[in-house]
Amino acid sequence: MDALYYDKKLYIKEMPEPDIDDSNDVKIKVSLAGICGTDLTLVNEGNDLGHVIGHEAIGTIVAIGDSVKTLNIGDWVIVNPNEHCGICDNCRKGLYYLCSGNEGDLAIAGLNKHGTFSEYFITKENFVEIIPSNISTEQRETFLLVEPLACVLQGLEKLDTSELKKILVIGQGTMGYLATKTLLKSGHQVYSVDSNEEKVAMLSKTMPCCFNSLEAIEGEFDIIIDTVGNQFELGYPFLKRNGEFLILGLQHRHKVTVNTTALVQKNQKILGSSEYTTHFYDAKKYLEAHLDIQEEVFLKYNLIDFNQAFFEKSSCIKRVFVFSN
């Protein structure tokens, strides 16, 4: 089978089609696989991974192990890439994203094991969610957003949104888009900013208060959400007293200096959030009720066009690989 392999460079690698070797295994024929900001960061930073990348996917089950009870061949499913062990101290507390069962870390498809940018993918029964059978073929694609939305929902859960707030979302990649849409649907006053002018022009048709730069924004905010991961210095001056600054994006080599005196005197909070616990299921249920959230999101590529998918500038929200069914 063809797979997108990363070992200091990206390339298509012909690999053996994986087979089930555990009674709890599930074999999935991948239909769509999403490129995440984490994938872009890993590649742009030149990490020496040595495996198939990608961690977002939907597809159909083509084989199951003898112990699998809740899934059937032919089911459409969403891949949960975070394969927690379930027995370490953090897992027993429900903090699955802090699992230490995989040589001291959480096993994540595409990051420390083979990922989803391939024709077939093997995982365990526990790490898939079924897409309802009454969902149309076109709407089914929306569920590719479950994994990034789960990350967003955990982050938003850490914030005080018990009252309606004025919120700034920096970055309109997948997580920024989903955070903005979710907060708008909850009634908050949401401003968003992205450096891509074409994207801002497109989003402005359905999102109020979408800007091309922070300089175009006036006033301060109760909550600021950085979905890029390197915007703290630019965004922090816009934070109100008693405000909250949430960092959702990952930039592994980015460091900042924080004026702790201002932080303390203004009674502000800086929060970080990564991954999710039960939010994966919550995200699936949310999307079942909001299938229109995907209306302007995807730009599709064949796997062979991986260079364009990863490196060409685009105004789309999310780039995805399409595999033939």
Image (cartoon, grey):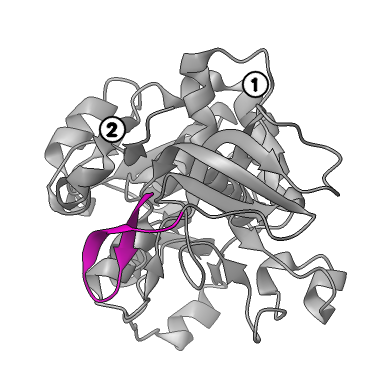
Residue count near mark 2 (Cα–Cα under 10 Å), binned few <14, some 14–19, many ≥20 = some
Horizontally, is 128 left or right of 152 in the view? right
Residue at 46% of width from left, 52% of height from top? 116
Of residue 260 and residue 252, the one placed in the foreground of this image is 252
Magenta-tinted stretch: 1-16
Please tell me whether mark 1 or mark 2 is closer to you in this view.
2
The secondary structure type at the circle numbered 1 is helix
Q: Is residue 231 magenta?
A: no
Q: Amino acid at mark 1?
A: Ala
Expressed as whole percent of the image width and height from the top left, the position of residue 207 reads: 35, 27
The secondary structure type at the circle numbered 2 is strand
Expressed as whole percent of the image width and height from the top left, the position of residue 208 reads: 34, 27
Whole-number angstrom distance, CA of label 1 to CA of label 2: 24 Å
Q: Amino acid at mark 2?
A: Lys
User: How many dots with numbers?
Assistant: 2
Q: What residue would you read off at disc 1?
A: 289
Residue 131: image quadrant is: top right
Which of the two labelled residues, at mark 1 and mark 2, occupies the earlier sequence position? Answer: 1
Is residue 230 visible in the rendered image? The answer is no
Tell me the quadrant of the picture where the C terminus can be found: top left
Horizontally, is 25 left or right of 201 in the view? right
Q: What residue would you read off at disc 2?
A: 300
Horizontally, is 93 left or right of 10 in the view? right
From the viewer's perspective, is residue 174 above or below residue 244? above
Is residue 91 visible in the rendered image? The answer is yes
- Say which mark, if any, is on residue 273: none
